[in-house]
Amino acid sequence: MHASDEGRPWTFYAFAAFFGLFVLFLYGPMIVIYILSFQGPNGGMTFPLNGVSLHWFGALISQTRVGDIAGSFQRSIGLAALVSVVTVVLSVLAGLGFRRRFRGSAFAFYLAIASLIMPGLFVGLGIALAFRLLGLQTGWYTTGLGAQLTWTLPFGLLIMFAVLGRFNRSYEEAATDLGATNWQRFSEVTLPMLLPGIIGVALFGFTLSYDELARTALTAGSQNTLPLEIWAMTTNVTSPTLYAVGAVTTIVSFIVIIAGLTSIAAIQRRRARGKLRATAVQAEQSHG
Amino acid sequence: MALLNQTADGAMGAAPPTAEQIADERSGERASWWQTAPLVVVLLLFFGLPMLVVLAVSFFDFSRTEIIPAFILDNYIDLFRSEVTLRLYLSSLKFAAIVWAVTLVLGFNIAYFLVFHVRSLLWQIGLFLVCTVPFLTSNIIRMISWIPFLGRNGIFNQALEGAGITSQPLEFLLFSDFAVIVAYVHLFTLFMVVPIFNSMARIDKSLLEAARDAGAGRFRTVAEIVLPLSKTGIALGSIFVVTLVMGDSFVVRTMSGGQSASVVSALQNEVAALQYPPAAASAVIMVIIVTLMVAGILRLVDVRKELAR
């Protein structure tokens, strides 16, 4: 007698309740600050809601009370897009390269892992010091970009490992046997097959960069990225403006996440349909 | 690493290679090298080199306005002489130990639920995403979202007073070690869930059935089959959580309201005061200690061997 033939064991319900509590722990506080961001003009940092208004969102745009939210937002989006593109190109290439052992592959692997677990502030400190000693200026699009890549590239590489671990190389071999050039094989077989994983890497690259703080803190130069601006706000802004900026930035993250996930899901669905059609055609042929 | 080993094994198959295969292998290796080179160059430039600079600067001298190239040990000597150093490390280690224990218990149970209790693949993916999505949103916002909860007039206190459990607000909730730990657990549990989930997902379910058929109870099955086979995930998750907590300064600053400090938050103060060489020395010592901790975890669990399974 197997468990799957019976009803759910009591432990299932215990675990489900536990999981539910964890999800509440994960999302509850976030939902609360989104609600509080609609606080009335005279409301405070906590409940009760003193009316409902868009006052604190307006305060974000007016820029007089808080720093340069709009400018830092533009910089963060630009930087995230840049990081995302570089992360995709470099980690897809490296992922393909890592499929065979080569001289220095272990070094490259450990370099990436060390870069991943090194405290972010240390990386930023090192880059800032190096540029200082060289007499160069730091800036979000130079040192900031480099600092963030030390965080997104190892992640991209690990995702590529997971994706390529399930990748069947015989499709590539078949392409070669059918006379495809290296480029044709890459662009018409490998790349389309890896596309969902690549979107995943792009999604991680974008969102990790967009929210990065520790590595960027010492390397952004004179102009702040959004997380740095928010970090500055946490120390001197004691109004629901803080929640309003939190709500806005989380909505941006969610739009990016949903766009990434739905495009992955769409690709998978189309593939499943294609497979189904192929099987149907095969069946028809064998009957006819 | 699993990938490396697999392909290496595949390439070195049982039959002796022909000259053509060897030539193929060589050109393939060259291609691999060029494919990986850009990533390695970026990491060397923005990670490897800067870390060497930190090491070099830790031996430099400094004045109020500049850093002076030199080779002195004063920064280290000051660090070891100061009583503050030990206190900071004890504080950081305390946070790391508590957060590790809590995230391990949470992460193991969540992964166990997702792998062994959720039967439909669609549900499994969906619930897994529910756990991972917050990771892709702002850490600072997730951290400050505890303020309206834990504050003196926050929701938690209002609820406790409303229920008649307490007559006055609990003061220790916000801007305390408690708040720091809550925020860490909130931010970092995911790093425990994902690797353990990956390990558990690879456990052959028939092993569990065999254990049950042989008369093992639920607890014994978990203790003697699931736990040992999840070792790799637990080790990787532990490495993530421990390094994240030890390397943090932002959470401890905000959530303790400046009352607690960590090694890295003290280092950040030195950087703000332009005292780069002492900050660099502190970073070097921290890296050594964290590396020892990671090496200790890897000694207990051979992650590479397990990953190559």
Image: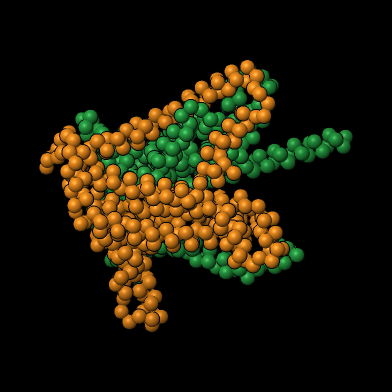
Q: Quadrant of residue B8?
A: top right
Q: Which of the 4 image quarters holds residue B2? A: top right
Q: Which residue sits at x=40%, y=45%?
A: A117
Q: Nearer the viewer, residue A45 or B151?
A: B151
Up-down: is B113 above or below A226? below
Whether residue B39 sits left or right of residue B9 in the image: it is left
Q: Is residue B308 above or below residue B182?
A: above
* Relative to A158, A179 lies left or right: right
Q: Colour of chain B?
A: orange
Going 50% across and 50% down the picture, which residue do you hit? B301
Q: On the rendered structure, is B219 left or right of B140? A: right
Q: Is residue A97 at all visible to an observer of this figure?
A: yes
- Tell me where residue B4 appears, x and y as whole percent: 55, 35
Pinpoint residue B156: horizontal percent, then vertical percent.
Answer: 38, 71
**Front in this rendered view, residue B198 or A84:** B198
Residue positioned 37% across, 70% down in the render = B155
Chain letter for the part of the structure drawn in green: A
